[in-house]
Image: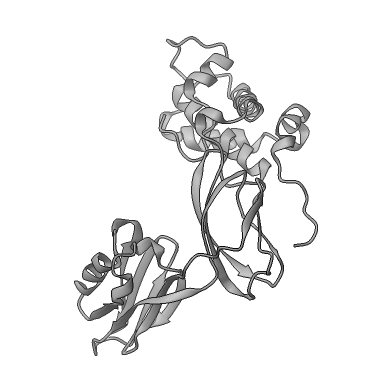
Amino acid sequence: MALDQYTTVTLGDARLFLGKGDADTADDQLLDMLIQQASKMVVDEIGTGSVVSKAYKEYHDGHGGRNIWLNNFPVTGVDFISTSRDDAMTVSYDGDDSSYATVEVTSTELQLRKRVSGVLTASAFTLEDYATLTLLEAAVEAVAGWTVVVSADYATYAAASLSPVPAKDARDNAVTLGVPDQGEGACELANEWGRIYNPYGWTAGHRNVYIEYTAGWPRSEIPQPIRSACLELVKMMYDLRSKDGTVESEKIGEYSYKLASNVDLTKSTLIAEKLANYRRPLVMGA
């Protein structure tokens, strides 16, 4: 089984918990699916993105208060915080064949769209594929009609550092794309639950606070109660499986979802108790 961002236990862990020997592999495909389902259920119950250590990039609204709460926890490190942006590059469409042309930056892609004679065409560039904005510039300009100008100060910045923007009109218009400005030095991580404290207050604005941080545990250090809760869920779903035959391999995924839908975590006191200490405490105010 390929371990994904949610998976908290291994196939070997599940076999051992169910009393299966290493040679009993008949249900391995189903168990793989159930492990993924159970791991995701645990994550959702705790209220974080993943219990496995992972790097995150988030934008938050500045609201004038002193605290911002990150979306994921436990936070093990904060790498960068910025409260402003600098103009890094412009993108425009200079062709005269389109009724409209737009450029958009999502968290993962730069997207170009244009409509010519009623036909919409699109090009997408995965930001992680370009180590610098200069490389992204070359790729975009290889698409006919599009022009990119990268500021010399930001030529070596990673393309993934571009700030998300909704689709903007680029037809005969230079759309400015930005990157987070210099780091904010006055703030600090107040606790592992993800409270970032700024003694001067966060400057008011829409998605103007950018934070890079790491949250979760190394897979080998995931707390035992979380691992145990996951294994209990795997067993609960496994015990609900059909007793009168096997499931066709192409329907294993659908079947695992069906089993998961029959498990109500609110009725499992044992699992709830195991996860209780890992939920973020209720926070009043900012």
- 238 versus 53 height, above or below: above
Of the pair 212 and 229, the residue shown nearer to us = 212
- In the rendered image, residue 150, in percent from the top left (x then y), is placed at 29, 76
Of the pair 70 and 199, the residue shown nearer to us = 199
Left or right placement of residue 220 versus residue 67 in this view: left
Count the marks: 0
State the colouring used for the structure image: one colour
The quadrant of the rendering that contains the N terminus is top left
Quadrant housing residue 207? bottom right
- In the rendered image, residue 145, in percent from the top left (x then y), is placed at 22, 81
- 112 versus 33 height, above or below: below
At horizontal 34% and vertical 75% (from top left) the residue drawn is 113
At horizontal 25% and vertical 87% (from top left) the residue drawn is 94
- In the rendered image, residue 38, in percent from the top left (x then y), is placed at 59, 33
Of the pair 67 and 8, the residue shown nearer to us = 67
- 227 versus 148 height, above or below: above
- 41 versus 167 height, above or below: above
Quadrant housing residue 229? top right
Quadrant housing residue 127? bottom left
At horizontal 79% and vertical 61% (from top left) the residue drawn is 285
The quadrant of the rendering that contains the C terminus is bottom right
Left or right placement of residue 77 versus residue 236 in this view: left
Left or right placement of residue 37 versus residue 168 in this view: right
- In the rendered image, residue 267, in percent from the top left (x then y), is placed at 77, 33
Left or right placement of residue 122 versus residue 6 in this view: left
Of the pair 114 and 65, the residue shown nearer to us = 65
At horizontal 38% and vertical 63% (from top left) the residue drawn is 109
